[in-house]
Image: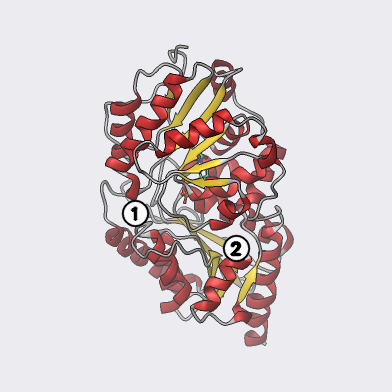
Amino acid sequence: MSNRHLAPLSLTGSYSPQFRPDAARMATCADSRSMRPKILCVFGTRPEIIKLAPIIRELKQTHHDIQVMTVMSGQHTDLVEPFLELFQVKPDFNLQIMQRQQTPNEVCARVLAGLEPIMSKEAPEAVIVQGDTTTALAGALTGFHHKTAVAHVEAGLRSGDPHNPFPEEMNRRLISRLATYHFAATSGNRDSLLREGVPADDIFVTGNPVVDSLHYILENTKPSSRVRELLKQTAGQKLLVLTTHRRESFGRAMRQNLRDIREFVERHEDVSLIFAVHPNPNVVEAARTELNGGSRILLIEPLGYSDFIQLLKQSWVVLSDSGGIQEEAPSLGKPVFVLRTNTERPEAIDAGVAFLAGNKPGHLLAMLNRAYDEPGWLEKIKQIPNPFGDGKTASRIAEIIQQKICRRAERITR
Ligand code: UDP
């Protein structure tokens, strides 16, 4: 099989983020003097927009007594913009903090500085942050400094190791210390928060809005010609879909797993691999060294969300160190081999739909071989309900925000 017809992945150049000269406000909020309570949603990366978009949509469509404002930090640039278009989110502010090779500390400092004038001018009733990014941490700290309620979506995930994933695990823990309202996806997440002393009344088990986004995509979009071409090239094959980009996977761990995957594909003529290569130079380099030129191995640039979901839908097994993919795969009835040594999403492992691959030489290969030799296995996985949500999370969260935050604002202004 040839990969000549694919949109090629550049394996030679380094990642060059878009630079923009001014960190300027993108739009003026038309009714900034309105008495409607304001909610500021802060996001900066691909998973944050995927998971906040349904909540923003729900608040705007059904809670007209709230003014929703959105701030994009720019922690990711090229990766995020197609998602804004897809979910029709137009940021009110763009902090444009992206700089080449910046450290978490620098990201944090720039987001804090960028949020300061917005908070002072707009004085929102609440700041909503999602997940575990440095943007989310800076958003939560900003809310705290301004004595504003902080609502944390996807609260209570814990890997158990403060250094892994880095810095995400510590970001999550710190956000839980700063947040006022905690939207936990599962009862396990709630238990983790309770163990850390978060008051029960401030925790709401809502599911994860990623499932809402997935449903939205499945109902409202169709595969593009690009993804149709990819699927044509791998038709009739057992398709492995791979993503890997986490810091702790870089280097030996990532290379070892890529070698195992290559060996498995080479051994089985009915297996193909599509690897959506993250633009991080560590990933690009590992992909080039370990996988380039392999037969039935397609290296592509990251796909838009809709196309990526279409690819997952057609996969045989998903291989990933991503958090969101562990949450999406169960809704599509797909097994995920998690390319990590731990996970803060044990629900998928306990349900029997995700499996930790670790990074010991040969371990992933053995897992793949076992899956290949066990027919019937996939049928069982399709029956497992998604432990992370039912697609109705956004309306639950919007309702709670309305009740907790906006009614409080009414009381104060009366
Ligand atoms: N994703 C995508 N295109 C790709 C690879 C992933 O749209 O080429 C989506 C994927 O479906 C998931 C999200 O990006 O919802 C995961 O983002 P990422 O792995 O960056 O973050 P994490 O979930 O690990 O925080």
Question: Which residue does the numbered mark 2 point to in the structure image?
Answer: 68
- Answer yes or no: disc 2 within 8 Å of ligand 1: no
Look at the picture and state if 177 lies above or below 324.
below
Question: Which residue does the numbered mark 1 point to in the structure image?
Answer: 97
Q: Could you tell me residue 161's position as x and y percent?
A: 38, 63
Disc number at residue 3?
Answer: none
Labels 1 and 2 touching (C-beta < 8 A): no
Name the image quarter holding the C terminus: bottom right
Q: Nearer the viewer, residue 31 or 200?
A: 200
Can you tell which quarter of the image residue 215 is in?
top right
On the question of residue 7 being in view, the answer is no
Q: Residue at x 71, y 68 (%)?
A: 399
Whole-number angstrom distance, CA of label 1 to CA of label 2:
22 Å
Neighbour tally class for label 1: few under 14, some 14-19, many 20 plus, Cα within 10 Å:
many
Q: How is the image coloured?
A: secondary structure
Q: Nearer the viewer, residue 208 or 386?
A: 386
Q: Residue at x 51, y 56 (%)?
A: 92
Neighbour tally class for label 2: few under 14, some 14-19, many 20 plus, Cα within 10 Å:
many
Q: Nearer the viewer, residue 105 or 32?
A: 105
Q: Could you tell me residue 307's position as x and y percent?
A: 57, 32
Label 1 residue SS? loop
Instruction: Say which amino acid is labelled 2.
Output: Val
Q: Residue at x 69, y 47 (%)?
A: 384
Can you tell which quarter of the image residue 171 is in?
bottom left
Can you tell which quarter of the image residue 410 is in?
bottom right
Look at the picture and state if 270 lies above or below 301.
above
Disc with the residue nearer the chain's start (1 vs 2): 2
On the question of residue 373 being in view, the answer is yes
Label 2 residue SS? strand
Q: Is residue 124 left or right of residue 333?
A: left
Instruction: Say which amino acid is labelled 1.
Output: Ile
